[in-house]
Image (cartoon, helix red, strand yellow):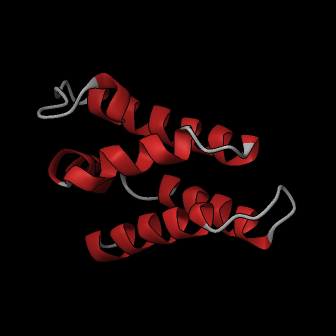
Amino acid sequence: MQKQEFLELFKAAQRAAKYTSDENSPEVARCIQFMKRLKEAPASLAIDVVLNTTSIGNGIRFLRDHKNPQIRSEAELLSDLWRRYLYATGREQSGTSKDSV
């Protein structure tokens, strides 16, 4: 996976979450599928994107605060994974708060 694909998947997850109409909406399943694919990205890519793309913090916050519990849960898992990657490399979340990732 390349950086551009990673960013496109993240934007697609946000779009799907934005247009969810109810819990059984197909957008919910799409959003979750996109986030699951993001979890498959190499750690080095995730670290690079999280540290160097300012919109990621706001986007993950939007997903973690979503009204749908399935989206919130998957977003928490994704956020926790990215946080573990950052801590495993000993990197600080420069320019972002702990809540943004």
Q: Residue furthest right?
A: 24
Q: Position of residue 98 (x, y in %)?
A: 31, 23
Q: Nearer the viewer, residue 40 or 70?
A: 70
Q: Quadrant of residue 74?
A: top right
Q: Position of residue 96 (x, y in %)?
A: 20, 33
Quarter of the figure that contains the N terminus: bottom left
Quarter of the figure that contains the C terminus: top left
Q: Quadrant of residue 85?
A: top left
Q: Quadrant of residue 49?
A: bottom left
Total marks shown come to: 0
- Which residue is pictured at 19% across the width and 24% down the height? 90
- Which residue is pictured at 64% across the width and 40% down the height? 72
Q: Nearer the viewer, residue 44 or 26?
A: 26
- Which residue is pictured at 53% across the width and 47% down the height? 63
Query: For this view, does 14 lie left or right of residue 55?
Result: right
Query: For this view, does 6 lie left or right of residue 33?
Result: left
Q: Position of residue 91 (x, y in %)?
A: 17, 28
- Which residue is pictured at 27% across the width and 47% down the height? 50
Position above or below: 97 against 76: above
Position above or below: 70 against 88: below
Q: Nearer the viewer, residue 93 or 46?
A: 93
